Image (tube, helix red, strand yellow):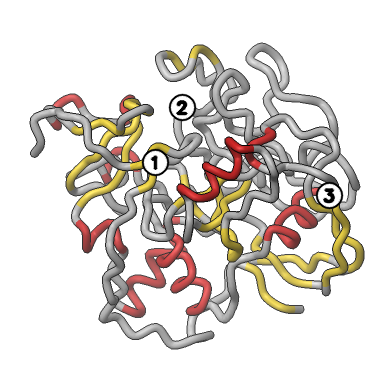
């Protein structure tokens, strides 16, 4: 265990990047051999991507664009712990966090008996914790307290997510597919339910942070960490938790289309990163207003955290 010194890994907007060297996985994953999670068909047509009212300019949220896409099926929820456990049991797959031996845990989720941990420079509320993985989400011997079958699987890398998607005969969504599904047929709206913004006092349509970040989460939406994957009201396509709860990996690389000097420098520092959408239970407007459809972030494909998961799509 470390002595509490900070570890010089990259600090993203709200997702620390491990940038660890790739490791081969010895598990044999046969494409399409696993049972598909429940899904719905999303109609094709003109998909909207981005927004003409960007909030985080250096994330390249705008402009609003239109792209023709084909119909596809998408999981009604992010992949759950139980579904991922079936995958591991059937294939012997070992996740990257398990093979590297450590992962990132939010400070408030670190057990008191763990002892000193390493912080991420710039976002010290993220702690590098030995023994944290998709089973023991918050570190060794924590599965009994925090692992719930119907919650989204977390502590999975982009590489892990892609392996699971291959097993169930699917793939990770593109940004266009993800946003088209998230809009639920409502068109140019900021949230899957429409225009009304969540707040800290009365409107809780999703699982995000309420209170002062990162010191005090009031949990007024009912959850301090993840909520069940199928919780809160679904959108118009019957999809749950597309914003808040956990970030969701996509198949796309993280690209910033901007001439702003700061944005170009950020893109250069995130070469090879993969795009994630939706925000998480750790998002708050004061710090990370990314629980919007057009919002986006990127992380290295090996990175794993307590607030990142994924869902799967299939060609219709």
Q: Earlier in the sequence, mark 2 or mark 3?
A: 2
Local SS, label 1: strand
Residue at mark 2: 224
Local SS, label 2: loop
Please identify the quarter of the rendering in which residue 145 is found: top left
- Badge 2 local density, few (<14 within 10 Å), some, or many (20+)? many
- Badge 1 local density, few (<14 within 10 Å), some, or many (20+)? many
Local SS, label 3: loop
Cα gap from disc 2 to disc 3, whole angstroms: 26 Å
Residue 209, image x, y percentages:
54, 24
Q: Quadrant of the C terminus?
A: bottom right
Residue 299, image x, y percentages:
47, 50
Q: Is residue 228 visible?
A: no
- Nearer-the-camera pick, 66 or 91: 66
Left or right, 12 with reference to 73: left
Residue at mark 3: 236
Residue at mark 1: 16
Q: Quadrant of the N terminus?
A: top left
For the point 87% across and 68% down, the residue is 68
């Amino acid at each position: 265990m470390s002595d509490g010194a900070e570890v010089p890994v990259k600090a993203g907007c709200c997702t620390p990047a491990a940038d660890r060297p790739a490791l081969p996985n010895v598990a044999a994953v046969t494409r399409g051999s696993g049972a598909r999670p429940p899904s719905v068909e999303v109609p094709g047509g003109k998909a909207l991507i981005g927004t003409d009212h960007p909030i985080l300019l250096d994330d390249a949220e705008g402009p609003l664009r239109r792209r023709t896409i084909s119909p596809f099926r998408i999981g009604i929820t992010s992949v759950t712990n139980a579904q991922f456990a079936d995958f591991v049991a059937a294939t012997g797959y070992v996740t990257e966090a398990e093979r590297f031996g450590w992962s990132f845990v939010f400070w408030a989720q670190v057990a008191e008996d763990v002892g000193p941990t390493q912080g991420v420079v710039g976002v010290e509320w993220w702690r590098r914790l030995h023994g944290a993985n998709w089973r023991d989400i918050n570190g060794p011997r924590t599965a009994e307290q925090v692992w719930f079958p119907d919650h989204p699987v977390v502590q999975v890398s982009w590489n892990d997510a892609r392996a699971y998607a291959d097993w169930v005969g699917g793939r990770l969504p593109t940004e266009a597919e993800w946003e088209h599904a998230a809009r639920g047929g409502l068109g140019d709206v900021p949230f899957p339910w429409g225009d009304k913004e969540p707040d800290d006092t009365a409107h809780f349509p999703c699982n995000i942070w309420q209170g002062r970040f990162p010191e005090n989460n009031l949990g007024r939406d009912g959850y301090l960490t993840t909520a069940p994957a199928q919780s809160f009201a679904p959108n118009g396509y019957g999809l749950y938790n597309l914003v808040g709860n956990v970030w969701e990996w996509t198949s796309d690389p993280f690209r910033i289309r901007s001439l702003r000097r700061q944005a170009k420098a950020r893109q250069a520092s995130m070469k090879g990163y993969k795009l994630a959408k939706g925000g998480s239970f750790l998002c708050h407007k004061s710090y990370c207003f990314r629980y919007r459809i057009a919002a986006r972030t990127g992380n290295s494909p090996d990175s794993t955290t307590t607030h990142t998961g994924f869902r799967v799509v299939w060609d219709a």
